[in-house]
Amino acid sequence: MTPGFWTSFGELVLLAILLGAVTTVVDSVLGVVGVSAMIKKLPIIGANWTLIISIVMMAVIDLDVVGGWGIALTDDWMKWVANGAIVLGMVPVKDAVVSMIGKGLRA
């Protein structure tokens, strides 16, 4: 079955929600261990921390959103990076969707 636009969109919104939860858990665990502040002070890693978590999350769940659009990437790391960047880019869209649904339910 080839996913349609709304299926892919919904999948990306759900992955953006999952990214928020995963980021919170990872930051909490690193804070308990006492290395969160140290990691976030590193220039390249600290500035791109959420992107790194997103890429690792996509590697762990091994879900290829880009492949559904007909984009064939040859190596696994390319899929992880592309999908992680796309999921991170969907976070503002997820926020807008959640806000829109919240306003619609109040009306």
Image (cartoon, rainbow, N blue to C red):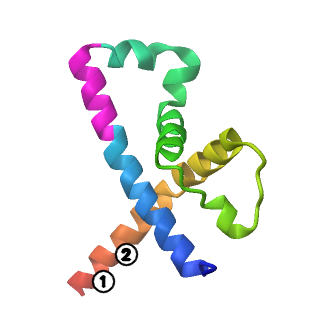
Residue 99 included in the magenta stretch of the image: no
The residue shown at (57%, 46%) is: 84
- Residue annotated with mark 1: 104
Q: Which residues are magenta?
A: 24-34
Q: Is residue 55 above or below residue 62?
A: above
The residue lying toward the viewer, choosing from 73 and 15, is 73
In terms of secondary structure, what is the magenta stretch mainly?
helix
The residue lying toward the viewer, choosing from 105 and 51, is 51
The residue shown at (21%, 82%) is: 106
Badge 2 marks a residue whose secondary structure is helix
Q: Give the residue type that dot 1 points to.
A: Gly
Q: Position of residue 90 (x, y in %)?
A: 52, 58
The residue shown at (43%, 20%) is: 40
Using residue 97 as the reference point, say whether residue 58 is left or right of it. right
Q: Is residue 38 above or below residue 72?
A: above
Q: Position of residue 53 (x, y in %)?
A: 47, 36
- Residue annotated with mark 2: 100
Using residue 28 as the reference point, say whether residue 94 is left or right of it. right
Q: Position of residue 88 (x, y in %)?
A: 52, 49
The residue shown at (53%, 72%) is: 9
